[in-house]
Amino acid sequence: MKSFAFSFSPFLLFSFLLFSLLPSYAQNPNCYRITFSDKNDSPYSVDRPEEFLSPRAIAKRVWFNIPVIEQDLPVNPHYIDSILNFSTEPSQIISKSKWDNSVVIFYPETENSQEIINEMVEHFSFVVDMLPVAYYQLPFISEKEIHKKTPISKQTSNTIAYTSSCDYDYGNSIDNIRLHKGELLHKVGFCGKDMLICAFDSSWGGFDTLSCFKSLFDNGQIWGTIDLMPGVNNVFITSNTDPMHYHGTITMSEMASCMEGKMVGTAPKANYFLIRTENPWSEQLVEEDFFAQGVEIADSLGADVATASLGYSTFDYEWQNIYTPADNNGTASIASRAASILAQKGVIVVNSAGNSGLLPWHYITHPADALNILAVGAVNKYGVVANYSSYGPAADGRVKPDVASIGYDAWGIYGDGSIGQFYGTSCAAPIIAGLAACLWQALPQYSSLEIMDLIRKYGDRYNNPDDRTGYGIPNFYQCYLDHSNSVPEKQMSSVSVYPNPTTGELRIEVAGQARNDVVNVEIFDVFGNIIKSKIENRKSEIEMDISALQTGLYFVKITTENGTLTKKVVKY
C-alpha cells in the first residue's frame, strides 16, 4: 500500500486506498527474486571499497568506525552470469541487492518461467531461495538502459557559497515546522547545509521545470537522480496533474523549497539525490526489491539522511500477498531489512508510518517496522492524530510509529507549482527528515543512531508512548540547546566554510562581529590529529589548500573570540 499524500478530504483518501485493495486480474509471475548463499570467489574485496563506495561513504565509515564487511560487497557477477545463461529463454536482471545477496530475474517472453526457476534452484548449489515478486510486461532492454542515472553535479555544488542566515518568512508553511520549533533551529544557522538527503518516491512530476525549484538546480543542491523502474528512465515524469506522478514533488517541497513568504521547507540548504523505487501505476512485491537497491545506493553515495514516503502491505496479485500484520517485525520484508541495515551504516532513515488506520490492514506498513529507523505518524498542526494514520506497535512489541509530524493539512507544492494542503503520513516523513538533517548539522559529534534516539527522547510522549504517535512530537530546537557543546550558533553564524565537498581549495569566510577577531583555523583528520593550521588577524576570508590531503572526511575547527565552530568537510 503506497502511503501517498493527496489534497483529498479524509473520506476521499479512504475511498482511494480502499479501491486500490480490490483484486486485480490474475497473472502468473514472470519476475523472481533469486537469493544466493554466499559471495565466494567475488572479484570485489573489502580491501578495495573504492570500487563500490564513494569517497564520502568511505570517509563516513572511517569516522564512525563502521567496518566495510562482506555484506557490502556487490552480488557476485559470476553467479548472475550463471543464472542468466541457465536457460535459452531470454532473461534479464532488473534489480540487485548486495545486502540481501539477491537479484530479480525477468523472463519477458515465456510462460515456463516457474519451471525454469525450479530447475535452476535444483541445479545451482549457490541458489538457496526463490520468490515470485512481479508480473510485468516490459520490453527487453539492454543492461545499460535498465537503470538510468544522472551523475552527481560535484563541480556545481563545489562552487556555490551560501550565507549562514536562515531567518525565513515561511508564509503558510510555518505550520509544517513550528510544531517542532524547527524555525528556531533555522534562525541559529542550521538549515541542512552540506548534508546529503536521499529521497525515495514514485516520481517528481514538474520538479525539474518549475521555477520554484530552479534555485536548487542553480545552486547545485540536486546532486543527481536514478530511476530503478526498468524501462522508464525518467524520474521527472511529465504528467503534473496526476497525483501519482507529482507525489515526490510534494514531499520534496516540504524539505527543499525556499520561497520566501510562501513555502519554505525544513532543510532548504541541504543537498538532495532522488531515487525512484516506486511504480506509480501498480503495487507489486518487486518494488520492495527496488527499494532495497535504492537504500544501498544511498549508502554508497554517503547519504546523511534517507527518507521515503512509501509502504508495503498488500499487493495487486493474490500470489504476492504474503504478509500479515504479524510480519511487522523488521525482518520479514526485504525493504525493512534493507532500511534496518542502512541505519547501521551511518544514515538517519525516516519512513512514513502508512495510511492504513481506517483500512482492514490497520497497522504500520513495511519498511516502517524496520529496526532503528524513524517511522513517522500523522497529526494536524494542533497535535491531534489523523484518523487514517497507521497503528503500531511493531509485531515484536517495539514502539511504532517512533514519532509524529504534520500529515493533515500539511503545506506543499503541486506538480503545477501551486501551493496547497495535503493529507497522509507521506507529508509527515519529509518534515521530520529535513529537521533531522538540520539537527545532525548542528550536532556532528553524534552518530546517526544517536541522533535518531535523541529525536525520540525529545518527543512530547517519551515517557508515555502510544500506538499512534509513538514517542510523540519531537522538539528539535530544545534538543539542540541541550546537546550543543559550542557557543550559541547566533554568535558564530557569520562563519562559513566552502566549497564542501572540495577537491582541494577551502575558504573560511568570517564576517560581521568576528571580522576583527584573531581567527585560528585547524584541520583534523578522523583520528583527531591536527594536520594543518593557520592563524589570521583582521581578515574576512581565509584560504586553505588541502589538495595534498588524501580523499576522505576532515573536521575544520574555527576559533574566534566569540567561540568555536566545527564543520565536517569532505575532500574528493
Image (spheres, helix red, strand yellow):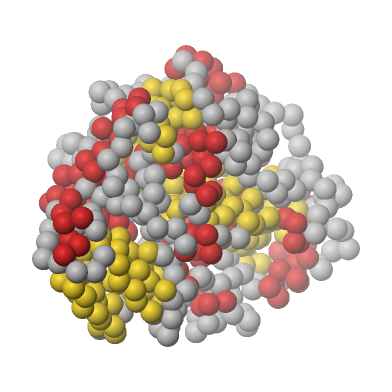
> How far from the left and from the top, in percent, is residue 220?
50, 54
Query: For the point 49% across and 30% down, which residue is it?
Result: 413
- Residue positioned 14% across, 40% down in the render: 463
The number of callouts visible is 0
Residue 337 coordinates in the image, percent (x, y) = 47, 55
In percent of the image, x 19 and y 36: which residue is there? 461
Q: Is residue 422 left or right of residue 472?
A: right
Residue drawn at x 45%, y 53% is: 271
Residue 202, image x and y in percent?
Answer: 59, 40
Residue 45, quarter of picture: bottom right
Look at the image and tell me whether residue 571 can be seen: no
> Is 379 displayed left or right of 457 in the figure?
right
Determine the image quadrant of residue 82.
bottom right
Residue 136 in percent (x, y) is at 75, 43
Viewer-nearest residue: 56 or 86? 56
| Of 121 and 412, the residue lying toward us | 412
Q: Can the viewer see residue 308 in this picture?
A: yes
Is 104 rendered above or below residue 415? Answer: below
Query: Depth check: 504 or 139 in front?
Result: 504
Which quarter of the image is occupied by the N terminus?
Answer: top right
Q: Is residue 540 shown left or right of residue 305?
A: left
Q: Nearer the viewer, residue 494 or 126?
A: 494
Q: Quadrant of residue 134?
A: top right
